[in-house]
Image (cartoon, coloured by chain):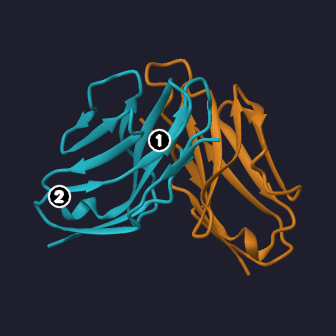
Chain colours: A cyan, B orange
Amino acid sequence: AQTVTQSQPEMSVQEAETVTLSCTYDTSESNYYLFWYKQPPSRQMILVIRQEAYKQQNATENRFSVNFQKAAKSFSLKISDSQLGDTAMYFCAFMRGGSEKLVFGKGTKLTVNP
Amino acid sequence: DAGVIQSPRHEVTEMGQEVTLRCKPISGHNSLFWYRQTMMRGLELLIYFNNNVPIDDSGMPEDRFSAKMPNASFSTLKIQPSEPRDSAVYFCASRNRLAGGGDTQYFGPGTRLTVL
């Protein structure tokens, strides 16, 4: 069974600085997808970024980018120019290709301080 | 374009009562998922449907939980009878399996259930 580990339960960063959230996963599959979801205090689960395992190029979405290290089974999220609105829980998730199931990590609580 | 819609947003009930949670997926999406989020267990998949047909309900905790999807635009998750340990946030998510990026699930705002 696949597992997703987020080793940082909580992190904080100053506004405008850069922060990196860690995620590792365990799988024997070669075809899979990885995701970062954001859950602000409103509770809504919002997709931040996705990565297909077969793509070597790291995904980017505006201030959000990932460092995907397939051999190391690592999928970290970098947030540049942090904003107060980035304060949220961040969940890393894995889905095997051809599967329907998302496996989530326990989450990292990020606080952006003014 | 409307996202996934869930109702109610908050539900408070007493132990033993029946609870029904509702979900309207994004129009055109053909897969629907029900999740439960608790502090202890995190986000867990309860059940999912493809084209209105239940595919995997192995995450449903016990027979008190049931889910239906009578048509492509509506699903319910029912708990009968409810117990305090069912208190959690319940999310519905949908996706279009056939579209590019069809692996992506889009979540509703969740229903916070409190069973007293």
- In the picture, the disc for residue A73 is none
Label 1 – label 2 distance at C-alpha: 26 Å
The percent position of residue A58, horizontal first and vertical second, equals 27, 31
| Residue that extends furthest to the bottom in the rendered view of this protein | B116
Pointer 1 and pointer 2 on the same chain = no
Q: As displayed, is residue A33 above or below residue B109?
A: above
As rendered, which of B52 and B100 lies closer to the eye?
Answer: B100
Give, as a three-letter code, the residue at label 1: Gly
Mark nearest the camera among 1 and 2 is 2
**Residue on which disc 1 sits:** B3
Q: Quadrant of the C terminus of chain B?
A: bottom right
Q: Nearer the viewer, residue B7 or B79?
A: B79
Residue furthest toward the front? A71
Which label belongs to residue A82? Answer: 2
Left or right relative to A33: residue B72 = right
Q: Residues within 10 Å of mark 1 (few under 14, many from 20)?
A: some
- The reply to whether dot 1 and dot 2 touch (C-beta < 8 Å) is no
Question: Which chain does the numbered disc 1 sit on?
Answer: B
Q: Position of residue A84 (x, y in %)?
A: 21, 65
Q: Is residue A39 above or below residue A47?
A: below
Whether residue A89 sits left or right of residue B43 in the image: it is left
Residue B6 in the image: state x and y as whole percent: 58, 52
Residue in view at x 24 percent, y 37 percent: A61
Residue under the point 65% across and 41% down:
A1
Image mark 2: chain: A
Residue at 40% in and 67% down = A41
